[in-house]
Amino acid sequence: MSRYGMVIDTVRCVGCMDCVVACKTENNVPEGFNRDWIAYDVQGEFPTLQMEIRSERCNHCDAPPCVYCCPTGASHVHDVGGVVLVDYDKCIGCKACVASCPYGARFINPEGYAEKCTFCIHRVEEGLDPACVSVCPTHCMHFGDLDDPNSEVSTLLASRRHHTLMPEAGTKPRIFYLT
Amino acid sequence: MSSFTRRKFLKISAATVTVASGAAVLSKHSVTPAQAAKRPATGVQRIPTTCDICFWKCGAIASVRDGVLWKIEGNPDDPLSRGRLCPRGTGGVGAHFDPDRLRRPLIRRSDRGRDAWHEVSWDEAFAYIAKKMHAIKAAHGPEAVALFSHGIGGNFLKHTLKAFGTPNMAAPSFAQCRGPRDTGFRLTFGEDIGSPERTDIKNAQCLVLIGSHLGENMHNSQVQEFADAVGNGATVIVADPRFSIAAGKAKHYLPIKPGTDLALLLAWMHVLVQEGLYDKEYVAKHGFGFEQFAARLATFTPEWAYPETGIAPDVIRATAREMARHKPATLVHPGRHATWYGDDAQRSRAIALLNALLGSWGSKGGFYTPASMDVPAYPYPAYPKPARPKVDNPDHRYPFAHETITTGIREATITGKPYPVKGWFVYATNLLQALPNEQETIKAIQNLDLLVVIDVVPSEIAGWADVVLPESVYLERHDDLNVELFREPFVALRQPVVEPPGEQKPNWWMAKRLAETLGLGHFYPWKDIEEYFAHRLTAAGLRYEELKAKGILRGAAAPIYAADGVPLTFETPSGKIEFYSPQLEQAGFDPVPVYRKHEEPPPGAFRLLFGRSPVHTFSRTQTNRVLADMMDENEIWVNADVARRLELKSGEYVRLRNQDNVLSNRIKVKATQRIRPDCVYMVHGFGHTAKGLRHTYLKGASDSQLVTRYATDPLMGGTGMNVNFVTLEPEATRV
Ligand code: SF4
Ligand code: SF4
Ligand code: SF4
């Protein structure tokens, strides 16, 4: 079984938002909403500053509260890669998952269902990278199987310092940031 | 004579122009990923073309699903994009779907009290324009017609206007942007930096950025290579009043006081020379006038530079030594938008000289020698020889201007000297935001008998036009072949991917029809543009059909570094790198750059700085709904401590008032540690006042509106624009 995840190199990322734009066009994300976004983490005082730029999205958590709390089973763990998905037909738009996600990764589509990053599973199943990964002009995003020790994502994690977002939330995120 | 009210700023809006109901907004086509995945593959066509959201012209592949434009990706064959577009290129779909687009040719109504437009046919529009042009020619000569254009799309209009007999055509990319840089490098190495820049960023071991904010300034190849350099562990040195994205990647961030970059450059050179750290062999072999140059640097010590720049002497020395350690793979980037303070050509020359000391010109990790494909020009008949020289630079008052000066044409239009200019064509450049001091632009427009604006949206400049010609966006048209100097030779094709949604036409069609209407049809021996392509490509030994299918044809890569045998030659008077410049001296300028203080903001005021966002190009993408979703309005960056003192909070609206009492539109405060306390910063291109740009109308503030002052570069006529000072007025307390 595969376990998909992303490894994003914050050293290379310039925060250009190409990943956000690509998701939008690939998935026809409605105007006014985005499935991914950029965080600028600035520490220190001028001029002694440090800045980490992160492309963020659903972490496809190994322990996903959004799935646990979903009353209809619409939010589920997909059998390919363990990707966390929403079955739009089953979703009643109750927003329980939106509230449960510590990362603010979900929104309610104007058509009434919960929407978020799908890891572009429709592309991945065709052997392509997710749209954001495939367009990033700085080549800072990597996608693959975390359970395969020889995958690019696994070798990057083995060789570089990294962190996840809010590990204390206990959700076991599968997006890793290289620093 | 025309009066001010004659040309009221006409608002092209939905009220006066019907918007076709077929306009599709992206969200209306929502499909779930599952639905998308289920679509038959035959429903998706992938067509190679080139991007035009900026002038970089990246190779792209557009996907059309069931006849509707879906997405645009990079063309892996393209050396510019290397298969990946920048965010604007990816968001280019929004240009096609933009509901605010111009749809039909418009002529301003003669009953001027009623701000409104006639929609006319293309034939009527051309007949009107041709009649006016003939009248201007009869009264003032053909040179009284000028063209302002930006990008490759202007090529055919240039051809038509040259055939008409005028030499007056300019792009703001010279006097409002990269002109000083190219002049500074020409004076030193005898050659331009070019566009795309010949900077070998990806191989640089030490990269120095002076105000150049790569990553925010999103010229694709440059940013990709910047990430490569950073990923390879290159030492990055950034001097910028603002902690830019690039500063966040820097080993050394130098929070330089605005306007003092030349002092820093001189001190760096002083250290390299004084400590003997420069490339002595290279300088001895290729340099001219080094001794005189070195003597003039003597007083520019780091201690001298400290009070000017705010950068401590030990930091200046440490960074100079770091540059020397990596030479010749140290690239002091020449930047691009270089029109800052009016002494910009000399500052750029100092950058050139610093690179010369490091031996980086011609070296791997420095400046490479670019190549281009040999695609002969189309064999047109000879143009008539204009009876008078260009109008922009009388008596060569700017002796080192090697391109036409936009603001020189504007000045001639206002003064009528050296001769009157009575007709303007404006192609794909929003002159009111591109040129400094919009009142001068408006004054010039008052003197015109004809203003034709060719645009895709009803921009501010379109609002002033007599005739507005709606162009199809790049995804709907052919443009001239892109043959460019780069790392390797290539030729690229822009071709239509989808149909335009209205009566919009491509520029080549307009230029040809206009020529025919003017009786100059023989300047267009080809029937349509594909015949033109086939002719030129055949002459180059290439096949149009192949280019059409692939979008890009690449030539054989040749060596690009001196170490690999590329001869280093210099087209300067001495044939060498001119450390000391006799031609500058003869023209009455400093033969070696000299730092002079610039005026500082008065107490309580801030220097206004502006720059780029990665998701917008100039003032032309704010209506693109995909890109607007990324950034909808600009913010004014204010140092966090200053904001606290002024009791301003992030997100709160203020207005900026400049030294000439011009008040901006409201703009949100971004209180941040990422900027010095003596300046404020905003992204250029917002604060639109054209009502037809419905989505972006009055969102954010326009820096251009506040740039009422500019400092003209005496060498080349560039307009330094970082010389305006503003105060902040909270929106709530405004009376
Ligand atoms: S596209 Fe790449 S470089 Fe740009 S913000 Fe996204 S992750 Fe960062
Ligand atoms: S990031 Fe949020 S939405 Fe995504 S799996 Fe984790 S909890 Fe669920
Ligand atoms: S740099 Fe970006 S906007 Fe410019 S041509 Fe390339 S993809 Fe298009």
Image: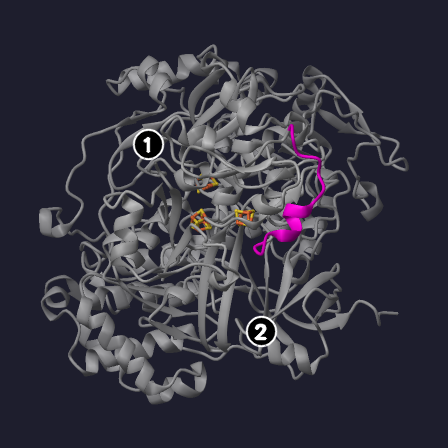
Residue bounds of the magenta highlight:
A89-103
Q: Are marks 1 and 2 on the same chain?
A: yes
Q: Residue B24 is drawn in which quadrant?
A: top right
Subunit ID for the residue under disc 1 = B
Q: Earlier in the sequence, mark 1 or mark 2?
A: 1
Q: Residue B381 is drawn in which quadrant?
A: top left
Q: Secondary structure at mark 1?
A: loop
Q: Position of residue B422 (x, y in %)?
A: 66, 39
The residue depicted at 54 percent of the width and 28 percent of the height is B33
The amino acid type found where label 2 is placed reads Cys
Eyeballing the image, is A165 above or below B263?
A: above
Badge 1 vs badge 2, beta-carbon distance below 8 Å? no
The residue depicted at 41 percent of the width and 32 percent of the height is A124
Choose between B709 and B26: the one closer to the eye. B26
Is any atom of residue B405 visible in this view?
yes
In the displayed structure, does residue B671 sit left or right of residue B394?
A: right
The residue depicted at 61 percent of the width and 35 percent of the height is A74
Q: Which residue is mark 1?
A: B76
Report the disc number at residue B679. 2
